[in-house]
Amino acid sequence: MKTKNKLANALVMLTILIFVASCGSDDNNVIPPDEISEPDPIQENTPPESFNLIAVADNEIDVDVRPNFSWEAAKDPDGDPVTYELHLTDNYNDFLIHPNTENQPNPLYSENFSFLAFQATESLGLLKDYYWRVVAKDNRGGRRASTIHSFRTRGLRIPDGPITSNTQFNGYGRTSVVFDDKIWVIGGGSSDVWYSENGINWTESTSNAQFPWRAEHTSVVFDDKMWVIGGSGSFFNDDVWYSENGKNWTEVTTSAQFSWRTRHTSVVFDDKMWVIGGLRPNGERLNDVWYSEDGENWIEATANAQFSARINHTSVVFDGKVWVIGGSGDNLEIFTDVWYSKDGKDWTQATANAQFSSRRNHTSVVFDDKIWVIGGGGNGGSLNDVWYSANGTEWNQVANDASFPERSGHTSVVFDNKIWVIGGQNADGPQNNVWALD
C-alpha cells in the first residue's frame, strides 16, 4: 500500500515539473523549419574592364615638360565607382612589380581621382625618356592597369624675342643673383642695384650703394644675404659686402686675406663662400682657391690648383663638386677645358677639350640636372651658342646660332624654372636685353 502511494506521488511531481517547464518556454522564439534560410553567398568582385590611354601617345617625341595625360573611362562590371592612379617614371624597371596588386611601385605620381585627364604638376626633365600608365580601381580592391606608353620630352626652348629689349641699366661687367624671389643685377661700372620679379619690369633698389663702384666682381647668395666680393673700379678691390634687402650694404672686411682681384669666380659650396682665380693689378693670372664661412675670415684651400691660372672663367656647383669651365690665361690663351673638385683643394680634369669652342666671359648655370654654357667671347668674336652636359665631360649643343644676339660679359641665373640671359656686349655695343630660355 505504501509502495503504491509513493509511486503515485512521484507521478504527480513529474507531471508538475513537466507543466512548469512547458510554462517557462516561449513559443514565439521557435522558428518553423520551413522558414529557415541559408545566408546570402558572398558576391565575388570583378575588377574594372580594360581601357586605353589616349595622350600622351606611345613613342611620342618633343613632348612638353608639363604634359597633359588622358585616357578612356574604365567600366566596372559590378557598377562600383572607379577612381584612377597615374604612374610616371623615367625608369621602365619601376613597372616590374605587378600593377594589379596593393603593393605599388615607385612610379605612383597621383591617385584617388575620378577625372580622365591629368596635367603634370612639376616640370619633367628636358630631352628625357619617360614611361606612364594609369591604374583603374574600384572601391572593393579590384584593379586594372592600362598598357605602358613611352615618350620623350622636348629640348630647351629658346624664344624668338627677348622678355624685354631695353632695360634701364647697361649690361656689361655686372653680376646677377636670385634672392627673395627676384632677379638682382648688381654694379657694373657703377654701384647701382636693380631687381625684377618677372624679368620685364626692373626697379632700382639703390643708385649708389655703400660699396664703391665696380665691375667684374662676383656675387653670391649666402646666409640669407646677397654678397659682393672684389672687382675693379677706381682701383682693384679685396673687400667683401653684404645686404639683406639690396638697398643697405654692410662691409664685412675692407681687405680680405686673398689678394686684390677681379675677373674671378665665386660659388657657395659646403656651407662656405669660395673665391677662385682671377686677375691681380699687375696683370698676374691666379689659380688660387679661398673659402670663408662668414665673409670676414678667409682660408686658402690651395695656392696653386691643378688647373692653369685664369680669368673670365665660370664656376658652378654640380653633382656635389665645384666646377671651373674655360676662361683665358697668360698670353691671351683661351681655354676649353673643364675641371672639378670635391674639396676645393684637389682638382681633376673632366676634359681638356670640351666639344664647345674655347671661350671666356661666358656664363654657366645648373639647370635640369645639367651644366649649361652660354655665349661668351672666343677667338672669332662674341658667341650666341648654348651647350649642356650631364657629366662635365661630354657636351651637347642646343643651338649654334641662337635667336638672341652674340654676347660676352653677360650674366645668367636660373629663376622661375628658366635660364635667364641678361645684358653683355658685342661688336654692336652694350646689350640691354633680357632673354628667358626654358
Image (cartoon, grey):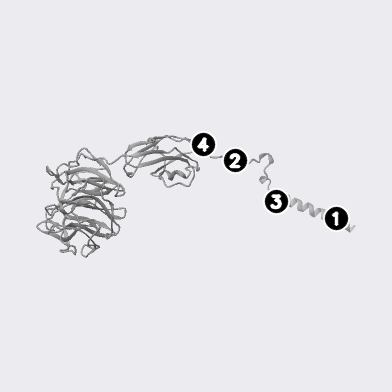
Q: Residue at x 52, y 38 (%)?
A: 46
Marks 4 and 3 sit apart, C-alpha to C-alpha, by: 50 Å
Residue annotated with mark 4? 78
Compared with 301, 352 (above or below) is above
Residue annotated with mark 2? 41
Residue annotated with mark 1? 7
Residue annotated with mark 3? 24
Name the amino acid, label 4. Asp
**Along the line of sight, the residue nearer the viewer: 295 or 398:** 398
Compared with 88, 52 (above or below) is above
Mark 1, secondary structure of its residue: helix
Name the amino acid, label 2. Pro
Q: Residue at x 49, y 42 (%)?
A: 100
**Which of the two discs, 2 and 1, labels the residue nearer the N terminus?**
1
**Along the line of sight, the residue nearer the viewer: 327 or 1:** 327
Closer to the camera: disc 2 or disc 1? 2
